[in-house]
Amino acid sequence: MAEFSERALGIQPTGVRKMFDMAGDDVISFGLGEPDFQPPQVAIDAMTKAMQEGHNKYTTTAGLPILRRKIAESWNSYESDMDESNVCMTMSGTNALLACTMAVLNPGDNILLPEPYFPLYAPDAVLCSAESKFYPCLFENEFIPQIDDLESLVDENTKAILYNFPSNPTGATLNIEQRDMLLEFAKRHDLWIITDEVYDRIIYVDEHVSFLGTGYENLLLVNSFSKTFAMTGWRIGYVLSPNLEAIGQITKLQYYIAACSNDAMQYAVLEAFQSAADYPAQMAIEFQARRDLICERLNAMSGVSCHVPEGAFYVFPKVEVEGMNSEEVAIELLKGGVLCSPGSAFGDSGEGHLRFAYTVGREDISRGMDKVASVLSRLRGES
Ligand SMILES: Cc1ncc(COP(=O)(O)O)c(C=O)c1O
């Protein structure tokens, strides 16, 4: 048989999917990271209307100018002099990430990636024939990267660093001092910053701290409406940058990746911006109540400790069961009726942790945590 590319052979299915595929229908699922809400009704209605009105065609690659302007305006409090030329629509955050890595990485370059990580980052580097170097975001540092670690990894082939706050899988956010330290590091080494801020609207702190608005030009901000408007299945996102040349390069690449984003859907997202602006904040209120519940329950279990996340909808507790790794623990929990992801699915430094996405209602969280408590106490020989 003819051979497949090293690129295809060099990537594997993620550990999150592996557990998901093993699960039956009757489990309480803390597995996949998608809001259990419907998109705003106004967006659903606007999509139908747009299709009926004939918005079923290719759009320009960068996307609908009026939507891009709206997106740029939504970041006004961070960077005020942006408009539609600072935004390129994509078919999702996933697509935006690939376009960004393709725009800045050459074969032989390396990119600094967080670990534990969102499992698409390293394969994106493989798709660019580049190398990934992982900087640790450890429990003992509240999942915040340490400059010494970054300095020990960077070399003459390092072209970019990817930051992800609020983080999947840890839920960590940055304060301004931490952001500035990470920014200075990138400046010092003249790196591109790819900042994945898809959870910017799901936060439990006063304000999202962004890398945008810092005056740094080598910046590509990745975002998506999957989480903001609970539209994971719609597949729509964008890249935004203060650097117009960067947006030009991204738009050029994006033409060859996807031609353009979805026509009618762009009208639907525009309507969501206009008529359901407080939708993500409302969702975040419910997520915060769930976060409080799940963290309280987890922290009450022996051998389990978690930081209370300040954003996204994941909690990443340390779970100690002697003689078992995180995948083995996750499999036992699955047998006990609870689907979660082993920390090792997010890189080696995720070992010893589990990730729970609190994207189920509070009643299910309570029932799920009862099951987790009983399985863990059995595994720990306590019952
Ligand atoms: C950190 C992070 N970035 C990007 C994405 C991609 O989101 P989407 O492709 O649905 O826009 C996700 C999805 O889970 C994520 O958690």
Image: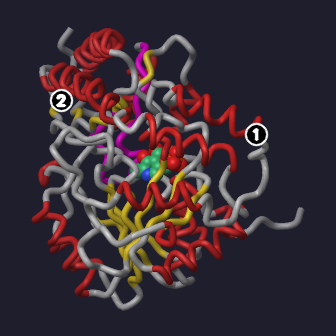
Ligand 1: does it lie within 8 Å of the C-beta at label 1?
no
**Furthest residue toward right:** 1
The span from disc 2 to disc 1 (Cα, nearest Å) is 54 Å
Query: Which residue is pictured at 45% across the width and 35% down the height?
Result: 275
Q: Which residue is mark 2?
A: 304
Give the vertical position of 79 relative to 355 (above or below). below
Within the image, what quadrant is residue 54 found in?
top right
Give the vertical position of 218 relative to 359 (above or below). below
Q: In the image, is residue 178 part of the stretch drawn in magenta? A: no
Instruction: Point out residue 301 in the picture as x, y percentages from the top left corner.
Output: 16, 20
Instruction: Point out residue 188 in the picture as x, y percentages from the top left corner.
Output: 23, 87
Dot 2 amino acid type: Val
| Closer to viewer: mark 2 or mark 1 | 1
Query: Which residue is pictured at 61% across the width and 34% down the height?
Result: 46
Ligand 1: does it lie within 8 Å of the C-beta at label 2?
no
Within the image, what quadrant is residue 292 found in?
top left
Boundaries of the magenta span? 337-355
Query: Which residue is pictured at 53% across the width and 53% down the height?
Result: 237
Q: Which residue is mark 1?
A: 53
Contact (Cβ within 8 Å) of mark 2 with mark 1: no
For the N terminus, the image quarter is bottom right
Instruction: Point out residue 56 in the picture as x, y percentages from the top left corner.
Output: 78, 46
